[in-house]
Image (spheres, grey):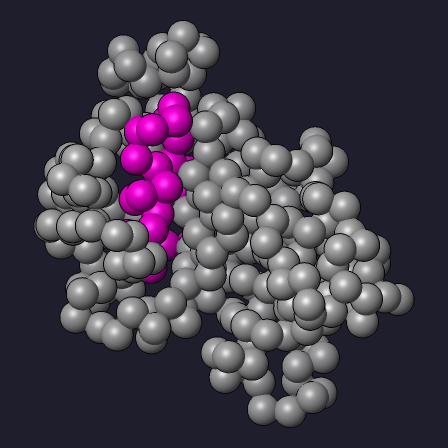
Amino acid sequence: MRYIVNMECLNVYIKGKKILDCINLRIPRNSIFTIMGPSGSGKSTLLRVLNRLIDLVPYAKVEGKVHVFGTDIYEVDPYVLRKQIGIVFQTPNPFPHLSIYDNVALGAKLNGVVKNKGELDKIVEWALRKAMLWNEVKDRLHEPPSKLSGGQKQRLCLARALATKPRLLLLDEPTSNIDPVNTRKIEETLVSLKNEMSIVMVTHSPHQAARISDYIAFLYMGKLVEWGHSNQILISPRNKLTEKFIKGKI
C-alpha cells in the first residue's frame, strides 16, 4: 500500500457552512506530509476527519470517501481507528493530575500495547527519548507536568502520542505556541520518526514546511489548490495562490 490516506471529493459542512470543498488527496506512507495554508482554510478540519474527531463537532456533515490504512473510515469503529492514529494539538494539553510518567504511560495502557510494568517502563522511556525529553525529566518522572515549560509540555504530549505506537501521527500546528529551541527539537523528532510511521502535520508556516516536509498540500478557503513533492511546491508552484502564500503575500 503506497498511500496511507486516500480522499475522494471530501466535503465537510459545519452548521450548513461548507468548510472543505471536494478535496481529492493521497498521502504517501512513511513520509512527512504537511498541510499548509492561511487561517480559516480548513486545515484543522481536514486533520480531524482522518481520525473521525469531526464526529464530535456539533452539526458537522461529511461527504465523499476517505480511506485510511486501505479501509473506509466510516466502515470501522472510530475507537478502533483512533487506536492507530496519534494526535498532537496546537496547545499543549498534558493531564495536570497525572505525573509526567503517567501522562506518557496512559496511552500505552489504554491501547493495550503493554502487558507488564517492565514493558511500560521501556515504552515510556522510548517515547520520551524520541521526543528529546528524557534527559530533562528522567529524574522527576513522578512530578506533575505543571513544572515543565510550555515547550516541554508540548514534547510531553508528543511522547504521549508516540507511546501508543501509532501507524499515523497527526499534528495540528504543534509548534505555533512554543519557542524556537523546542520547535527545533520537535522538528528533529518528526524527521527521525518517518521511517517508523506516517506523519501529517498542519502548519501556517512555509518555512517550517520547507524544513521537514517530503510532500506539501496547500489549502485556501476550503479548496485544495495543489499538492506534490515539497521541492516542487516550494520552488515551482503551479498555482499563483500557492506562490503568493509562500512569499507571504496572503
Residues 237 and 148: in front is 148
Q: Position of residue 61 (x, y in %)?
A: 16, 50
Q: Is residue 113 left or right of residue 64?
A: right
Placement of the C terminus among the 4 image quadrants = top left
Q: What residue is rendered at 56% in x and 44% in y? A: 91
Q: Position of residue 18 (x, y in %)?
A: 16, 35
Q: What residue is rendered at 26% in x and 74% in y? A: 77
Q: What residue is rendered at 72% in x and 49% in y? A: 152
Q: Position of residue 73 (x, y in %)?
A: 22, 64
Q: Is residue 242 left or right of residue 146?
A: left
Q: Against 27, is 226 above or below? A: above
Q: Against 104, is 55 above or below? A: above
Q: Is residue 222 visible?
A: yes
Residues 237 and 245: in front is 245
Q: In which quarter of the view is residue 224 placed?
A: top left
Placement of the N terminus among the 4 image quadrants = bottom left
Q: Is residue 20 left or right of residue 94?
A: left
Magenta stretch holds residue 49: yes
Magenta stretch: give its range: 28-51
Q: In which quarter of the view is residue 39 placed?
A: top left
Which residue lies most toward the top here? Answer: 249
Residues 11 and 71: in front is 11
Residues 116 and 231: in front is 116
Number of marks:
0
